[in-house]
Image (cartoon, rainbow, N blue to C red):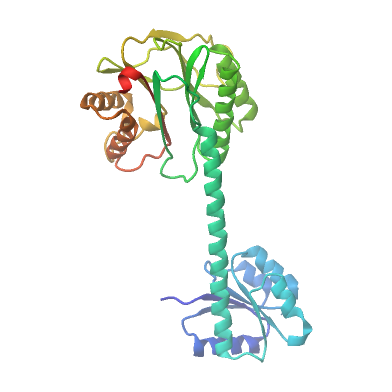
Amino acid sequence: MRGPSLVLVEDDAGDTLLVTEMLVEVAPDMELTCFATLQSALQAWPSTVDCVLLDLGLPDAFGLTALEKVRARVPDVPIVVLTGRFDDGIGREALAAGAQDFLVKGQVDGFGLERSVRYAVERGRAARDRRDFMAAELLAQENVRLQRGLLPSPLIETSELSIASFYRPGSDRALLGGDFYDAVQTASGVHLLIGDVCGHGPDEAALGVALRIAWRTLVLAGHSGEEVVRGVEKVLLAERHDTLFATIAMVSLDPTLTHADVLLCGHPPPLLIQGGAVRELEGRALPILTLLPSAEIEPSTLTLDGDWGLLLFTDGLVEGRAAPGAINRSGVDELVRQLQSLVSSGIPRVELAPTLLAEAERRNGGPLTDDVAVLLVGNSGWWS
C-alpha cells in the first residue's frame, strides 16, 4: 500500500538531508519530493501530494507569506510548517492561518515527524469528508426545493378525475433537470401541463420552476389558450440565460370532462387511451417557446367519449436506445405499442408509468441519460 506523498520546501540543504534521513529510517513508505524555493515547488508541483512540509524562512517567501501561497495553490492539502524557534510565535500564528501542525527544527525526531505528518493527513482527510458531507446535505436540500417547484401537488377537486405523476432524473445527474408538470382545476375545467427546458443543471431547473409557476398563475387568473402560452413565453425570454428554450404541452378539459383543447409547443403530443386503443392526440404542432412571436396559436379540440386516459410525457421516455448498443432511438411508436400492451394486460393504472420507464431502460441497456416526467390522467370509469 502506498504511503503518503510529501512535498518538502526547505532551502537549507542540511535540514533537507536530515528530514530525508529521518523519514527513510522510520517511514520508508512515504514518498518525499524536495524543493529549495517556493517558486520552484509551485512550478513543478507533483500531481499527487498528501502533505506539505514547509519552511517559513525561505529566500523567496518569508513567514506566513509562504503558507498563504501554498494554501492558495492546494487548499485541500494539509501543511506542517517548520520553524527555527519555538518561542518566536510563528508556529502558533501558522496554526491560526490554517496549518495542521508546526515542528521546531532540531527538536523533533523521526517518530515525531512521522506522527505529525500522518496526523495531518488524517485530519485533512476528515476535514474534506466533513466538507463533502455538508455539500451533499446542501445538494439534497436544493433537490427538495427544486422538486417542490418543478413537481407540485395537483390542485384538483373533482372525484371524476384521477391523476398519477412520475419523475426520474437522468442517470448522470444528482439534481433534477428542467422537466416540469402541473395540473389545476378552475371554473372553466381541468388544465394540464407538461414541459421541458433544454439542457440540464440548476439553471435549467430554476427556469423550469419559473415557467411552471407562471403557467399556474395565469391559469388560476382565468387566462387560457394563447394568453397562457404568450405569458409563459414572456417569462422564459425574461428569465433564461444564453439560448435556453423550452417546450410545453397543454391540455384543457371542460367541466364535463368530455372535450379537450390541446396546444403543443415543440413538445411530443400526449397519448390518448380510449376503447382499448392508444394513439397520439391530434394537434397543430407549434414551434418551441421563444419562436412563437409570429405564430398563430389556436388549440385543437377533440371529443372524449366514454372512458379515457391521457399520458403526458417528456421526450426522455422515448429517446433511449431501441436496443442495447443500438444507434436508433426507441421512439413514440414503440411507446404506443408498449402502453397499449400494458393497458390490455389490466395492469393497475398507477403502475403504468414506472413500468413504461423500466421497459425503456431495458431497451436502452441501462438508465436513461435524460430526465423523464410523466403525468397520467383518466376519468373515473377508465381509472377504476
The residue at the point 58 percent across, 35 percent down is 206
The x and y percentages for residue 367 are: 35, 42
Q: Identify the residue at image location x=40%, y=40%.
A: 369
The C terminus sits in image quarter: top left
Q: Residue at x 32, y 43 (%)?
A: 366
- Placement of the N terminus among the 4 image quadrants: bottom left
The residue nearer to you, when weighing 301 against 103, is 301
Q: Position of residue 97 (x, y in %)?
A: 71, 70
In depth, the one of 380 and 270 nearer the eye is 380
Q: How many callouts does the rendering have?
A: 0
Q: Where does residue 5 sit, x and y in percent of width and height?
A: 52, 75
Q: Residue furthest left?
A: 345
Is residue 24 at least partly visible in the picture? yes
Q: Which of these two is toward me, 272 or 361?
A: 272
Please identify the quarter of the rendering in which residue 371 is found: top left
Left or right: residue 206 versus residue 169 is: right
Dividing the picture into quadrants, the one containing residue 17 is bottom right
Residue farthest to the right, as pictured: 88
User: Relative to 9, does residue 200 appear above or below in the rendering?
Assistant: above
Residue 62 at least partly seen? no
Left or right: 304 in relation to 158 = left
* Image coordinates for residue 114, horizontal then vertical, percent: 55, 84
Task: Residue at 61% x, 33% y: name it.
Answer: 241
Residue 142, above or below 346:
below
